[in-house]
Image: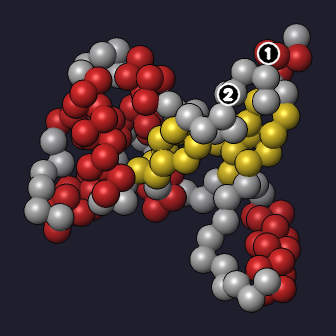
Amino acid sequence: MSPGTAVEPQIADRFNRAGTRFTESRRRVVAALQRAPGPLTPAELHRLLAEEVPLSSLYRAIAALTEVGVVTRTHDRSGVTLIELSEWLAGHHHHLVCRSCGEVIDIEIPQPTEVRVRSIIEEIAAGAGYTVTGHRIDIEGTCRSCRS
């Protein structure tokens, strides 16, 4: 999804329903996440924003965007918070995670493979008495740069 697409009205509507506004700082955070190759730490996001948004405002924007379901927080292997757009904006995807440098990039699995993965996940969940509502796969390894 490219910045400035038709999702802004949907995001603004989510904020309106929550009784707050889709401010310029929040718009900039969303645009920066749209440009990112994968989830970012708050520090990486701050650098990507070229400090257009003060760090204190960035944390407030992240909290507000999380609360209305625009962004999702996850954690890397060491527990550092990672921020990315929620699936309804970014589409369903998985991650490649470098165990050496910590880089995380988004990947889309071809549809036939995704169907097989979903089937396996549903089988595993059913065996444990769960109903699947979603899934996320992080594939760990070593990126090209770290192997060089």
Q: Please give the name of the residue rendered at 30% of the width and 35% of the height, measured from the top-left corner.
A: 59
The CA distance from mark 1 to mark 2 is 10 Å
Mark 1: which amino acid? Ser
Q: How many marks?
A: 2
Instruction: Read off the residue under disc 2.
Output: 103
Mark 2: which amino acid? Glu
Percent from the top left, x then y, of residue 60? 25, 39
Q: Residue 145 carries which label?
A: 1
Q: Please give the name of the residue rendered at 85% of the width and 34% of the height, measured from the top-left corner.
A: 141
Q: Earlier in the sequence, mark 1 or mark 2?
A: 2
Percent from the top left, x then y, of residue 29? 33, 35
Percent from the top left, x then y, of residue 97? 73, 36
- Mark 1 or 2: the one toward you: 2
Q: Do labels 1 and 2 touch, CB within 8 Å? A: yes
Q: In this view, does 8 lie to the left or right of 89?
A: left
Please identify the residue farthest to the front as the structure is shown. Answer: 79
Height in image: 92 above or below 4? below
